[in-house]
Image (cartoon, helix red, strand yellow):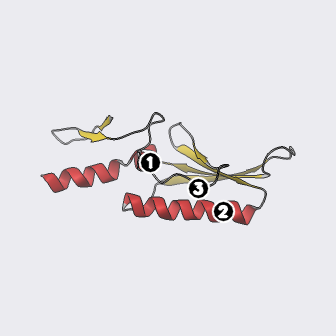
């Protein structure tokens, strides 16, 4: 559990996993995709086919926005490639606000409803 600091007189509890994101955050569906653990966390989608990686990132973004109840704060989209033969060629990363991935907007709305 973590608490969201704000100008409110009481704190809001967040149910976070070990990496600091909400336990209810939709997980990327493919085994090559993941959420990283840094400020403005990169959410990675890797595939040998760029349209497929982009489609998976768009599907995850839609599911996450539905879960969050508002647009996810994405500050950048990074595209890279790996010419090594042992890993997927394309690497698409969405740099997302960590408070959104922790579910802070959901917790704030829930707190307002109990007031």
Q: Tags 1 and 2 in contact by the CB under 8 Å rule?
A: no
User: Quick one: SS at disc 3?
Assistant: loop
Instruction: Give me the residue at 28% from left, 37% from top.
Output: 5
Q: Nearer the viewer, residue 86 or 99?
A: 86
Kindly identify which residue carries mark 3. Answer: 29
Answer yes or no: is residue 71 visible: no
Given contact means CB atoms under 8 Å apart, are the residues at marks 3 and 1 in contact? Answer: no
Q: Which residue is mark 1?
A: 101
Label for residue 17?
none
Query: Could you tell me residue 65's position as x and y percent?
Result: 44, 61
CA–CA distance between discs 1 and 2? 19 Å
Identify the residue position indicated by label 2 in the image.
Answer: 54
The disc, 2 or 3, on the residue closer to the chain's N-terminal end is 3
Taking depth in this image into account, of 52 and 97 the one nearest to the observer is 52
Q: CA distance from mark 2 to mark 3?
A: 13 Å
At numbered mark 1, what does the secondary structure look like: helix, strand or loop?
Answer: helix
Q: Helix, strand, or loop for circle 2?
A: helix
Q: Are marks 2 and 3 in contact (CB under 8 Å)?
A: no
Which one is in front in this view, the residue at disc 2 or the one at disc 3? Answer: 3
Q: Could you tell me how far apart the alpha carbons at marks 3 and 1 are, in whole angstroms?
A: 16 Å
Going by the image, does 96 lie left or right of 103? right
Image location (x, y in percent) of residue 113: 17, 56
Which tag, 3 or 1, sits closer to the chain's start? 3
């Amino acid at each position: 559990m973590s608490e969201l600091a704000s100008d409110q007189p009481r704190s809001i509890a967040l149910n976070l996993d070990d990496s600091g994101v909400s336990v209810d955050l939709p997980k990327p569906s493919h085994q090559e995709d993941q959420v990283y653990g840094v400020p403005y966390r990169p959410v990675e989608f890797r595939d040998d086919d760029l349209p497929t990686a982009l489609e998976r990132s768009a599907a995850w973004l839609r599911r996450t926005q539905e879960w969050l109840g508002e647009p996810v704060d994405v500050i950048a989209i990074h595209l890279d490639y790996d010419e090594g033969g042992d890993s997927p060629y394309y690497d698409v990363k969405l740099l997302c606000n960590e408070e959104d991935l922790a579910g802070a907007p959901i917790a704030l709305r829930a707190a307002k409803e109990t007031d």
